Image: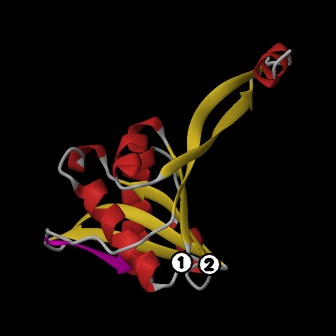
Amino acid sequence: KSEDELLISQGFSEKFEQTAMILKPSKPFDIESNLSIELVVNSQESNIWSELFHKSFGYNTSPETVKNTLSKINYYIAYNNCIPVGTAILYKTNNIMGIHSLGIPPSMRRKGYAEQIMKLLINLAIDKRSEFITLQASNMGKHLYSKLGFEEQFLIKNYTLQQT
């Protein structure tokens, strides 16, 4: 039996899957928009980040969690002309930068924000002398990341145990 068949036979079901992707950055992107990303540094910004994250993903990371981890995790809010339009996290381990939680609320999607945020994040990772950039792509984001030069590495499947 495959791993999938074994898990399903034991009462698990696939919850979602992501694709691990990697980029070896070479040169910064030109930025052609009014979009900016700002590091979250206080309680008010933690509230904004948490609210945007919830609208983007449909589940919560509390403002308290964000505030209590600001010294360890770099949370970013993307702004377009001072209006918050998205979230992201950068987390560096040695010379590898991980991009996490790139989220755009549904009402803000299809306006090019995700691509501009990614370009800004890649440029920031280059500024921080990252040799590689990694992320876990949903099906929604995979095409964008490929377009920006990321290469697929492997599939990540997440399962949940069905309640009886």
Quadrant showing the N terminus = top right
Mark positioned earlier in the residue sequence (2 or 1): 2
Residue highlighted by disc 2: 95
Q: Which residues are magenta?
A: 34-39
129 left or right of 93?
Answer: left
| Residue drawn at 59 percent across, 85 percent down | 71
Identity, as a three-letter code, of the amino acid under mark 1:
Ser
106 left or right of 32?
Answer: right
As for residue 31 lying within the magenta part, the answer is no
Question: Residue 44 at what x, y percent from top left?
Answer: 38, 78
Instruction: Give whichever of 140, 127 is nearer the camera.
Output: 127
Residue 130's label in the rendered image is: 1
Instruction: Give whichever of 89, 65 is nearer the camera.
Output: 89
State yes or no: discs 2 and 1 in contact (Cβ < 8 Å). yes
SS for dot 2: loop
| Residue drawn at 57 percent across, 40 percent down | 18
Identity, as a three-letter code, of the amino acid under mark 2:
Asn
